[in-house]
Image: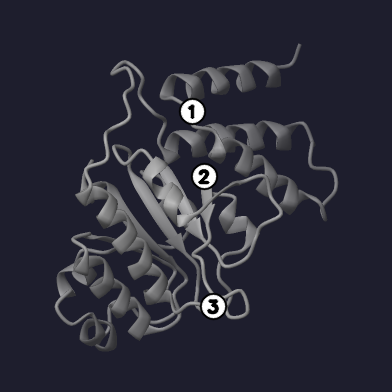
Amino acid sequence: MSFNNISFILHKPQLSENIGACARAIKNFNFKKLVIVNPKPIFPNDKILATSVGARDIISNSNVYETLESAVKKVDLVISTTSRFRNKNVKHIRLNDLNKIDYSKKVAFLFGSEASGLSNHEVSYTNYTLQIPTNPDFKSLNLSHSVIIIAQSVANLFRLKISKYSKSNKIRSANKKDIQDVTNLCIQKLEEKNFFKSFEKKPIMLENLRSIFYKMELSKKETRILSSVIASLAKKG
């Protein structure tokens, strides 16, 4: 278990002040990894640095990506925060379920943009969705407030020294890149077979397919087996 295993991903943040406040929030609880995906403001800028106060090092060491897919490649588990229930076959957890997460893995908490949150497409990249309990008549939280609630909750679990999950050292969990590779191979082979015949239905079919792979806790060996099976099935008989 390590604070370095935890990252906080801001997807398409819109306000410089919120980015700076999020950096300050994670540093308050001894986390160091802030990831920015396709920010609206220029990153970094003076306003971001000013609102980060004593967390300029978090800003200067942040990783910036153009796409969510590239941002989660080196992560094992992604937990997306949302104020809306998703009618998707994704595991939903609560704040008090965070003690069940295996923090020996690389875990990322994903936060949507201030205006629109996370779309179903973005949620399809995640293993779990997490809803912060709020007033049901006023669910919207400021981005930095959401980040600080999660950061404090996880830091508190670390202080309680949760026991590590016991698992054979021979089993290596697949990371997001492994999952992406087998998912993209499957999509490629389906494209070659003209599986996605309906142009209108294709986006939701891709979301559901990606969600199936991302929510499975596969090992590296299992992703290799799946890739071999998919490639074998795609061969002409």
Tell me the kind of residue under disc 3: Ser
Q: Earlier in the sequence, mark 3 or mark 1?
A: 3
Check the image and tell me how it is coloured.
one colour
**In the displayed structure, does residue 191 sit left or right of residue 24?**
right
Q: Residues within 10 Å of mark 1 (few under 14, many from 20)?
A: some
Tell me the kind of residue under disc 2: Asn
- The residue sitting at the right extreme is 198
**Image disc number at residue 218:** 1
Give the quarter of the figure containing the C terminus.
top right
Mark 3 or mark 2, which is nearer to you? 3
**Image disc number at residue 123:** none
Q: Which residue is mark 3?
A: 140
Tell me the kind of residue under disc 1: Leu
Residue at x 41%, y 41% (from the top left corner): 100
**Image disc number at residue 127:** 2
Q: Earlier in the sequence, mark 3 or mark 2?
A: 2
Residue at x 27%, y 40% (from the top left corner): 162
The alpha-carbon separation of the residues under discs 3 and 2 comes to 22 Å
The quadrant in which residue 117 appears is bottom right
- Where is residue 190 drawn, in percent x and y? 72, 33
- Where is residue 85 drawn, in percent x and y? 65, 60
**In the displayed structure, does residue 204 sit left or right of residue 141?**
right
Question: Compared with residue 113, is residue 1 higher up or lower down, i.e. above or below?
Answer: above
Q: Is residue 26 visible?
A: yes
The alpha-carbon separation of the residues under discs 1 and 2 comes to 12 Å
